[in-house]
């Protein structure tokens, strides 16, 4: 999938719905503001968000385990926009 996406950029995408295993798609959408997880726990999506998506305001459908949250909460919160919502 990495080869297929290549250097594709979709800056006009502001809302995206995708399963956890499609986390590489987020590299193409740096301006996304609303991310809805439709399959899996969302762990891989959160890792991608902290690396690429700096304007996220809403996360929905994530089922995160306590172990993940303890380890990665700080990097996630520093990435999300001020006033962001995790639904």
Image (tube, rainbow, N blue to C red):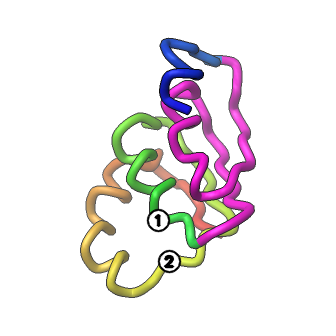
Q: Residue at x 51, y 54 (%)?
A: 45
Question: Magenta segment, which residues?
Answer: 12-40
Q: Residue at x 62, y 69 (%)?
A: 40
Q: Quadrant of residue 66?
A: bottom left
Position above or below: 85 against 10: below
Residue lying at the far bottom in this picture: please name it.
66
Q: Please report contact status of discs 2 and 1: CB closer than 8 Å, yes or no.
A: yes
Task: Give the number of the disc on residue 33.
Answer: none
- Looking at the picture, tell me which residue is in the foreground, 79 or 65: 65
User: Which residue in the structure is indicated by mark 2?
Assistant: 64
Please say whether residue 13 is one of the residues in the magenta stretch. Answer: yes
Residue lying at 57% horizontally and 15% vertically, measured from the top left: 9
**In this rendering, position of residue 37 left or right of residue 63:** right
Above-or-below relation of 75 to 3? below
Decide if residue 15 is on the left or right side of residue 6. Answer: right
Which quadrant would residue 61 be assigned to in this image? bottom right
Label 2 sits on a secondary structure element that is loop
Residue identified by numbered label 1: 43
């Amino acid at each position: 999938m990495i080869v297929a996406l290549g250097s594709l950029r979709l800056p006009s995408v502001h809302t995206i719905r995708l399963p956890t295993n499609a986390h590489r798609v987020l590299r193409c959408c740096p301006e996304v503001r609303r991310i809805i997880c439709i399959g899996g726990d969302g762990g891989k999506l959160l890792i991608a968000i902290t690396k690429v998506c700096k304007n996220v305001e809403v996360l929905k459908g994530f089922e995160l385990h306590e172990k993940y949250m303890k380890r990665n909460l700080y990097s996630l919160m520093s990435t999300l926009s001020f006033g962001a919502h995790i639904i």
